[in-house]
Image: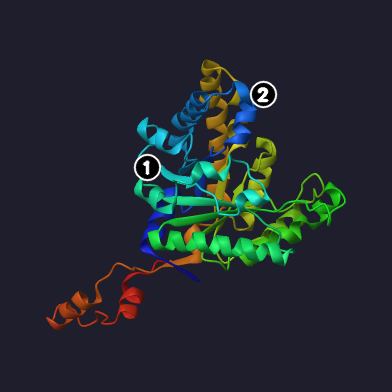
Amino acid sequence: MRELTIGKTRGLQQLSNSNGIFTICSFDHRRSLRKMMGNGNTSSITYESIVNFKLDICETLAPHSSGVLLDPIYGASQAIAANVIPGETGLMISLETSDHDAYGSDGQSAEELTDWDVAKVKNIGAAGVKFPLYYRPDLPNIASDQLNAVTRSAYDCKKADLALFLGPKNYIVRELERDHWEYSRKKPDLAIDTVHQLSRLPVDVLKIEFPADITFEWDEKRLLDVCQQLNAASSVPWVLLSGGVSFEIFLRQLEIACKAGASGFLAGRALWQEAANMLSRARFKFLESTAIDRMRQLSDLANTYGKPWYSKFETCNNYLYPDIMADSGKNGQSEDVPVSRHEAISHYGVRG
């Protein structure tokens, strides 16, 4: 079982609900959101319109979510300043690894994020950070560079004692897959191998797209088996990413994933995508009715079938003072107080 420090533990507590399940609303989108809002015509979409849309989502959905995932350009500081993130809702901010743009990105150029790092995320009170990663476990030369980039980011999070969510995404390689169907046949094995490799790194939670193409594979038992294999391959908790699918499809995927061992979800466009090009009044009406109802359905499923994140961790208290504890034992207050740092952590700091 993996050990988790106090800071990371607290971050995961803030991003999950009382059942240890993540019910997170994701709207860290940038370039893709601009395209959605402009129906492909990005030139008409202003900075202010993107910020206002994200604030509308946050105001309506954050009270019904265990956490929200925001970007640092249009969302995080703006939502804090506008007071639309409830105190009981955790905040996670998306950053990028140094090589992310080399393999594709949903976001703007990485240069926009040069003044944002893990320390700044920690300073504004966020509970965690998310890094995306385009990854092929069967391309060892490329994978090695990517693993090094993730390890550097993980070290920064360890230094800040900040929870790290890693979002790997497999992709088609034209030299290896002739068409979409050939990639779909490989997708389960790619997803399982990816989880096996990345969960051995110093990351805390994996954010995974559904590990099978349900337009290619419809059998419920087979889909459950794939998710169970993925769960067995992961040494850390994992959550399901909606990945741009419709709400109805994601609802089905989430039930299967949670029955297999997922610890909840990060839902983005499946919740709110229809509102992207609505006018403000219609948008708010949609978010306050349809989007909230969707979040409740997803949360009910995750709470019913999901596995608490702490089932794969034990928390070690790295903020104890063994010398003081040992002295208290000498004064007769306790004969069982451990005297070494290792004993103190083991004795006082474990939560299973």
Residue under label 2, please give it: 41
Q: Tell which tag, 1 or 2, sits nearer the viewer.
A: 2
Residue 49 in sight in this render: yes
257 vs 316, nearest the viewer: 316
In the rendered structure, which amino acid carries the disc numbered 1?
Glu
Residue 228 coordinates in the image, percent (x, y) = 67, 61
Name which residue lies at 60% across and 32% down. 33
In the rendered structure, which amino acid carries the disc numbered 2?
Asn
* Label number found at residue 232: none
Q: Quick check: 109 left or right of 328?
A: right
- The quadrant in which residue 105 appears is top right
Q: How is the image coloured?
A: rainbow
Residue 136 coordinates in the image, percent (x, y) = 71, 59
Q: Assign a secondary structure to mark 1.
A: loop
Q: Quick check: 293 left or right of 62?
A: right
Residue under label 1, please give it: 88
Residue 232 in sight in this render: no
312 vs 98, nearest the viewer: 98
In the displayed structure, would residue 178 be above or below residue 247? Answer: below
Q: Residues within 10 Å of mark 1 (few under 14, many from 20)?
A: some
Name which residue lies at 46% across and 43% down. 67
Q: Quadrant of the C terminus?
A: bottom left
